[in-house]
Image (cartoon, helix red, strand yellow):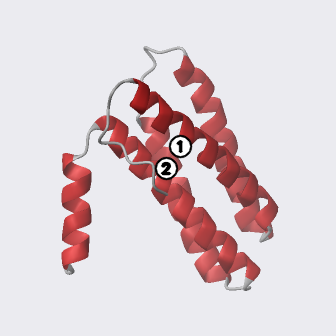
Amino acid sequence: MINSPYQKYQQAQAQTASKPKLLIMLYDGAIRFIKAGMEGISHKDYEKANNNLCKAQAIINELISALDYNYPISNDLLKVYEYMQHRLIESNVHKQVTQAQEVLEYLLDLREAWVEASKSQGLSSVQDGR
């Protein structure tokens, strides 16, 4: 159940977002959760680390399920996303930030690429903020 006005706003924003904007929102969420997971590892708060890294994995699963295999790049993205999943699991199991940091860098690069692709398609509703 959604209680706060902010949660209601977030839900409405996700439900009305264009596909490119929704994709950027997914990247933003994964980036945010990985950063929080890394912070948990750094502070030896392993519950926080586990919860946030698992949330990032769930978002990457969503990215995988959203792939459109009518485009050749989807097969490459699948491999990248699967690799990210593997690295996040390693980071979580071994409580090391190195693997999560690697995934974070990939997500930041991919996010930027999608923002640029959206801009080149004239989709001004995609924001460049992180």
Decide which of 124, 24 is in the foreground and name it.
124
Does residue 40 sit above or below 67 in this rendering?
Answer: below
Asked if residue 113 shows in the view, the reply is yes
Indicate the amino acid at tag 1.
Answer: Arg
Query: Which picture quadrant has residue 99?
Result: bottom right
Image quarter in which the N terminus is found: bottom left
The answer for how far apart the CA atoms under marks 1 and 2 are is 6 Å
Decide which of 108, 87 is in the foreground and name it.
108
* Residue 51, disc: none
Dot 1 corresponds to which residue? 111
Residue at 65% across, 31% down: 79
Query: Which picture quadrant has residue 88?
Result: bottom right
Which numbered disc flags the more N-terminal residue, 1 or 2?
Answer: 2
Are there few (<14), some (14-19), or many (20+) residues within 10 Å of tag 1?
A: many
Dot 2 corresponds to which residue? 27
Residue at 53% across, 64% down: 32
